[in-house]
Image: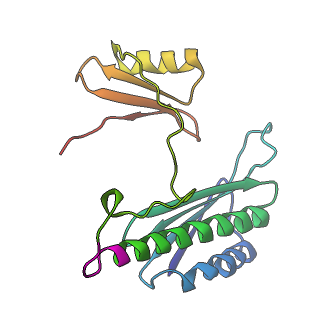
């Protein structure tokens, strides 16, 4: 496992770097040697946020990219919480790969499109919502986003006639998702 530690709004000290390497080193026994882990440590500058010590990690595996984010009042506590969350994600990822391989073995039949769904193991859709999307510009969609007070807003782009999404970014500002069909 290769670990890269970066700092945003803070200088990463050697003691914090070593602590992160020691804690995230626990993932090494679950991951492939070729896996890359990027850890970004940050301090939120907003004084109204009590849990301003943030640890974010991205794990690049052969399969999915795993991400986690934890925040607390202490950077070491954030790293501890982040490590626990990543351990759960990696274990879930490994178990799902093993289940998938077992199903694809000789003479196996696959239910649910090749995945084993156990009670509580997979996320469930608990609500479905339908609404009409109106053609508008991305700027108008941001204004609508602010009016409804949500974190995202779905709309039909007046220029391309495609369904797009605008969303509020954690670091401030807005993002625009423009889907591409293959």
The one of 180 and 111 positioned closer to us in this rendering: 111
Residue 96: x %, y % from top left: 45, 69
Tally of numbered discs: 0
For the rendered model, the colour scheme is rainbow
Residue under the image location 74 percent in, 39 percent down? 46
Asked if the stretch drawn in magenta spans residue 136, the answer is: no
Relative to 169, does residue 66 appear above or below in the rendering? below
Residue 89: x %, y % from top left: 56, 66
Question: Most prominent secondary structure in the magenta stretch?
Answer: loop
The one of 74 and 93 positioned closer to us in this rendering: 93
Is 44 left, or right, of 155 in this rendering? right
Residue under the image location 80 percent in, 39 percent down? 47
Q: Give the image quarter of residue 180.
A: top left
Asked if the stretch drawn in magenta spans residue 106, the answer is: yes
Is 81 left, or right, of 69 in this rendering? right
Is 158 left, or right, of 144 in this rendering? left
Tell me the magenta residue range. 102-108
Is 105 left, or right, of 93 in this rendering? left
Residue 143: x %, y % from top left: 50, 16
Q: Give the image quarter of residue 112.
A: bottom left
Residue under the image location 42 percent in, 22 percent down? 130
Residue 40: x %, y % from top left: 59, 61
Residue under the image location 57 percent in, 17 percent down? 148
């Amino acid at each position: 496992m290769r670990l890269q530690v970066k700092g945003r709004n803070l200088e990463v000290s050697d003691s914090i770097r070593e602590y992160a390497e020691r804690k995230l080193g626990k993932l090494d026994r679950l991951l492939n040697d070729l896996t890359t882990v990027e850890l970004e440590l940050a301090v939120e500058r907003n004084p109204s946020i009590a849990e301003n010590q943030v640890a974010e990690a991205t794990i690049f595996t052969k399969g999915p990219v795993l991400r986690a984010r934890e925040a607390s009042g202490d950077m070491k506590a954030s790293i501890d919480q982040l490590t626990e969350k990543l351990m759960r994600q990696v274990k879930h990822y490994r178990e799902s790969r093993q289940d998938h391989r077992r199903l694809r073995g000789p003479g196996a039949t696959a239910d649910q499109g090749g995945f084993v769904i156990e009670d509580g193991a997979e996320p469930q859709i608990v609500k479905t919502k339908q609404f009409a999307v109106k053609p508008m510009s991305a700027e108008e969609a941001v204004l609508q986003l602010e009016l409804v007070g949500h974190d995202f807003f779905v709309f039909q782009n007046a220029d391309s006639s495609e369904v797009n999404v605008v969303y509020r970014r954690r670091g401030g500002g807005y993002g625009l998702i423009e889907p591409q069909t293959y």
